[in-house]
Image: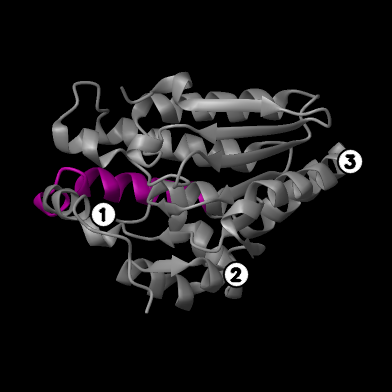
Amino acid sequence: MTATGRDAVKVETDDLGVTTISINRPDRMNALDHHTVGALIGLITQHGADPGTRVIVLAGEGGAFTTGADLQAIREGADDAPSPDVTMDNAAALVRAVLSAPVPVIAAVNGPAAGVGVSLALASDLVLMADDAYLLFAFTNIGLMPDGGASVLLPAAVGRSVASRMLLRGDAVAAAEAQQVGLALDVLAAADLRPAAAKLARRLARGPRRALELTKRAVTGATLAELDAALAREHEGQCELLVSDDFAEGVASILEKRRPDFS
C-alpha cells in the first residue's frame, strides 16, 4: 500500500538540531498527494518554529526527490483528489513554509524533481544534487503552467532568458547544468549526497541561528518581492488549465515516458 499523510514522511533530528524531512513514497517516486503535502507543510512549519531546530534538510527516499503532484492518483480519479483551488493553495503553502522557515533549508535532490517538486527545491536556500538527478520543468508538457512559485523562483535564480527557455520548452535540466547556471551548489555521486548534505547542515547548525534567520529573510525579501503576485497569477491560470483537455491528455502521456535524454 502506498503511504500517505504523515506516514509518507520520515523525520529525524540529530544532536546539533539538524532535522531531516524525507518524503517516503518510493513506489510513487515520492509523488505528492493532498495528505502528504499537508504533512510536509505541517512538519516544516513545526520544526522551523522549534528553537532546537537549526537547519532543515529536505530529501526523498528511494530513487526520486519528488516527481510533484501524484498524477497517477489524478488519472485514477481518486476520491480524495483535491479541487484545483485546493491544489494551488497547497502548492503555495508548501513553498511559503520553506521560504518563511527561520532556519536554512537544504534540498538534497537524489533523483528527479518535477512539477511542484522543482518548486520545493528552488524554494530551498541551498541545493545539492546527485550526479544522476535532474530538474524537470514539465509543466507545459502536460498542458499546465509553472506553479508553486516557480514562475518567480526560477527567474530570480537564473534570469529571465534562461528561465523562459527552461519553462516554455519544458526542459529537463541535468545536475551538471543545474550547477552551471547556479541552481545547485554542488553535484555529488549518489552515495555521497546525504553525507554531504549532513556535513553542510551541521556546519550551518553551528552558526548563530538569529544571524542566519535575518540573512535568509533579507535575501528572500530582496529577490522574491513579487512572490505574492506570482502565486496569484499561477493560481488563476492553473485553475483554468487543470480542468482542460490538454492536461487530461498530458497526464496520460507523461505517465508512460521514460527518463529524459540529455544528449
Q: Tell me the amino acid under the disc marked 1.
A: Leu
Task: Examine the structure image and report whether residue 84 is included in the region drawn in magenta.
Answer: no
Q: Secondary structure at mark 2?
A: helix
- Looking at marks 3 and 1 on the same chain, the residue that comes earlier in the sequence is marked by 1
- Nearer the observer: mark 2 or 1; the answer is 2
- Nearer the observer: mark 3 or 1; the answer is 3
Please identify the quadrant where the N terminus is shown. Answer: top left
Instruction: Check disc 3: other Cα within 10 Å, few if <14, some if 14-19, many if 20+.
Output: few
The residue to which callout 2 is attached is: 179
Does 43 appear above or below 263?
Answer: above
Name the residue: 86% across, 38% down: 210
Residue 187: x %, y % from top left: 62, 64
Is residue 203 among what the camera can see?
A: yes
Is residue 149 among what the camera can see?
A: no
Alpha carbons under labels 3 and 2: distance apart: 26 Å
User: Which of the labelled discs sits on residue 206, or is there none?
Assistant: 3
User: Which of the labelled discs sits on residue 187, or is there none?
Assistant: none
Q: Secondary structure at mark 3?
A: loop
Residue 236: x %, y % from top left: 30, 46
Instruction: Return the residue nearer the eye: 185 or 160.
Output: 185
The residue to which callout 1 is attached is: 144
Q: Quadrant of residue 78?
A: top left
Residue 215: x %, y % from top left: 79, 50
In the picture, measured across the screen, residue 229 lies left or right of residue 54, that is left
Q: Tell me the amino acid under the disc marked 3.
A: Arg
In the picture, measured across the screen, residue 248 lies left or right of residue 32, that is left
- Looking at marks 3 and 2 on the same chain, the residue that comes earlier in the sequence is marked by 2
Q: Quadrant of residue 178?
A: bottom right
In the picture, measured across the screen, residue 42 lies left or right of residue 83, that is right
Name the residue: 21% across, 50% down: 255
Q: Tell me the amino acid under the disc marked 2.
A: Gln
Per the rendered image, the range of residues in magenta is 227-247
